């Protein structure tokens, strides 16, 4: 290199003291999860993980319908689907079938 001191040599410091280095100590094992949970509950920590709900069964339906509605209507719709143990798509299909039947009954075709 021109105009300056070159790279430092590893052999420039003959009295290299490595006495301050020591092998890593073994980590202590973490406390049992039950103990952590008990301590967290005692201190009233709240879990940030939402409660998992059972996954609904899959279907062959591939099209999607998005609608805006009121909270009351949405709650009622989900309550019916849950009470009948229907998928949301099944509840929608039953609702459409009921509307079609009602229109036929009124002569609306």
Image (spheres, grey):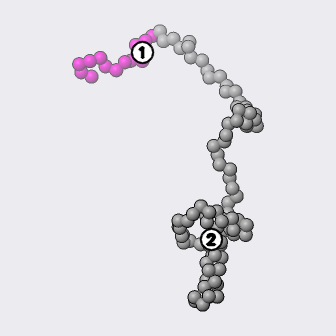
Q: Mark 2: few, some, or many residues within 10 Å (few <14, many ≥20)?
A: some
Q: Nearer the viewer, mark 2 or mark 1?
A: 2
Residue 13 inside the magenta-drawn segment: yes
Q: Is residue 67 magenta?
A: no
Q: Is residue 84 visible?
A: yes
Above-or-below relation of 24 to 85: above
Q: Quadrant of the C terminus?
A: bottom right
Quarter of the figure with residue 25: top right
Label 1 crowd (10 A; few <14 / some 14-19 / many >=20): few
Residue shown at 31% from the left, 19% from the top: 6
Q: Position of residue 39 (x, y in %)?
A: 73, 32
**Residue 5 vs residue 93: left or right?**
left
Quarter of the image for the N terminus: give it.
Answer: top left
**Furthest residue to the left?**
3
Q: Is residue 58 visible?
A: no
State the extent of the magenta-drawn residues as a range. Answer: 1-14
Q: Residue 18 location, x and y as percent?
A: 53, 14
Local SS, label 1 = loop
Where is residue 51? Give x, y as percent: 68, 50
Q: Position of residue 30 (x, y in %)?
A: 70, 31
Element under disc 2: helix
Q: Which residue is mark 1?
A: 11
Q: Residue at x 24, y 21 (%)?
A: 2
Q: Are marks 2 and 1 in contact (CB under 8 Å)?
A: no
For residue 62, what is the image quadrant? bottom right
Query: Which residue is identified by label 2?
Result: 89
């Amino acid at each position: 290199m021109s105009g300056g001191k070159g790279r430092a040599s590893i052999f420039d410091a003959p009295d290299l003291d490595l006495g301050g280095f020591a092998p890593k100590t073994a980590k202590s094992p973490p406390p049992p999860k039950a103990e952590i949970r008990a301590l967290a509950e005692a201190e009233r920590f709240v879990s940030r993980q939402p409660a998992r709900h059972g996954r609904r069964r899959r279907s062959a339906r591939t099209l999607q319908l998005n609608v805006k509605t009121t909270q009351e209507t949405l709650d009622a719709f989900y309550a019916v689907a849950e009470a009948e143990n229907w998928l949301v798509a099944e509840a929608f299909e039953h609702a459409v079938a009921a509307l079609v039947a009602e229109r036929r009954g009124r002569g609306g075709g």
